[in-house]
Amino acid sequence: MTKYIFVTGGVTSSLGKGIIAASLAKLLQARGYKVTIQKFDPYINIDPGTLNPYEHGECYVTEDGAETDLDLGHYERFLNVPTSQANNVTTGRIYQHVIQQEREGAYLGKTVQVIPHITDEIKRRMQLLGQSGEYDIIITELGGTVGDIESLPFVEAVRQLRWELGANNSLVIHLTLVPYLAAAGELKTKPTQHSVKTLLEYGVQPDILVCRTEHKLSQEIRKKLAQFCNVNINAVVESIDASTIYDVPLLMLKENLDKTALTKLKLSNKNEPDLENWKNFLGKLKNPTNEVCIALVGKYIELPDAYKSITEGFIHAGATNECKVKVSYIAAESVTKENVAEKLKGMDGVLVAPGFGERGLDGKLNAIKYVRENNIPFFGICLGMQCSVIEFGRNVLGLKDANSFEMDANTSNPVINLMEEQKNITNMGGTMRLGAYDCEIKKGTKAFAIYGKTKISERHRHRYEFNNDYLKQYEAAGMIASGFNPETGLVEIVELKNHPFFVAGQFHPELKSTVANPHPLFVSFVAAALANKKSK
């Protein structure tokens, strides 16, 4: 029977439930168990696809085209196992399904209510992945903070489900904060006690407390938390601030979080976790022999979580190259023709980030022109690729009004055009070209040298594409289309012939970079930046 672990949060948000869930999953996986993680978010949006990155950070896209919470990126990066549409569910999706059922008469005229109809649908979704028989353990992270009105139906669903599953088939981990008061010089347990009390009022007793803290928990503090929160003292787990999220699995191993969970689920913990590769990665990450500076030119730089997967992709690639990657976030709007040299001074490579809309477009074009003319390694992702095409059209081909149809519907040279299948779409959510698509790479190109094969698959999230009417003109001038979708002819990768590293993809390679499999484009870009630094 599949076992279930529920992870709730208390006291405050942003404590790192996703990292704790991913770390526990990693430890269980390293012991030989088949594990997956799902995220239940309490907001009413159907998915994060229409949310501003400032509101919610990046929108993570799965292989099957689901627009999901960024925590699913952590799950994949830790476990090296793809997630799917079923791994992220929102309140909006739950209500949408129930209302649709009501409209179709599925409830036979009954009054539709939060209990049982909403909670029943939540429970059904929570067990969906378990019905495949593929997983031994399913970890469910509940978004929000215990005590929030919007998370109440999820907590109630957990209460009901635990009763239905029976003893030893589920457990609840409550992640909470033990703050340090500098004036008093001590850690305070009262916020955690109140948070657990609130959870108890909803009928849910946590089995394990994971306590975020800036200072080590003394035995006295652990005993106090155990006594007043009704948990065993060995189920009080310290989660001290770490220098990198990739330290957390080892910190949780030290605290026996996996052993405690397995004991409570009546599962064997005899096999010691195999973390050799993870430790090797951490060794390289923490002991770099070189350092490179990469400029990330984007429009959401005030919130680094907007580019979370890109940042993590650089961490994986840096460890592979035994090189620390120092990312400098540069606001695209601030880059002008006059200051571009100063803005990019000392940078060993430049990445132009994905995004939507016209804001910051000119700054991205200025940055690309500078790196193209000065042989600085360049990497473009999605809109970054489209910008490289626009810049080349304007400054090399002489198409002065070359533009994307997204930015100027009246341009006489739409070198980036709206995809044909997108032209009649009016709804915003979930309607882009989403998920994994095949790409065929030309031999003899930089892309082929990077990937080492002609057939790849990458994830997408876009509405606009390279306009193939201009392809011959571009290739004649030195911008090569080195990757195509075999079915549609869509240009997936462009690169420059006579440049040390100028590669851009219409897809999002950062979404497939994991600790176990760093993405080859990121690895090669960091290597090119390192070579550029050494040549200087």
Image (spheres, helix red, strand yellow):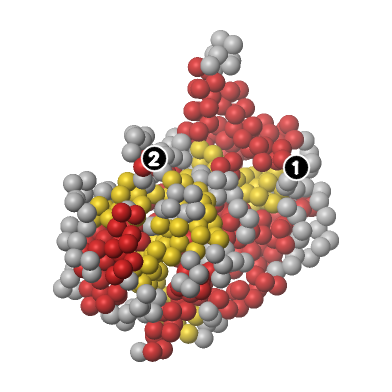
- The image quadrant of residue 381 is bottom left
Neighbours of disc 2 within 10 Å: few (<14), some (14-19), many (20+): few
Neighbours of disc 1 within 10 Å: few (<14), some (14-19), many (20+): few
Q: Classify the position of the N terminus by image quarter.
A: top right
Specify whether residue 341 is in view: yes
Against 533, residue 494 (above or below) is: above
Towards the viewer: 27 or 228: 27
Against 167, residue 525 (above or below) is: below
Instruction: For marks 2 and 1, give the one nearer the viewer.
Output: 2
The residue indicated by pointer 2 is 421
User: N-terminal of the two: label 2 or label 1?
Assistant: 1
Residue 133's tag is 1
Could you tell whether 387 is left or right of 133 in the image? left
Q: Classify the position of the C terminus by image quarter.
A: bottom left
Task: State how far apart marks 2 and 1 are (Cα).
Answer: 37 Å
Q: What residue do we see at 40% from left, 76% from top?
A: 501
Q: Looking at numbered disc 1 in the image, what kind of residue is underneath it?
A: Gly
Residue 48 picture location, percent across and down: 44, 44
Q: Looking at numbered disc 2 in the image, what kind of residue is underneath it?
A: Glu
- The image quadrant of residue 420 is top left
Q: What residue do we see at 62% from left, 49% from top?
A: 37
Residue 100 picture location, percent across and down: 51, 22
Against 200, residue 222 (above or below) is: below
Towards the viewer: 6 or 390: 390
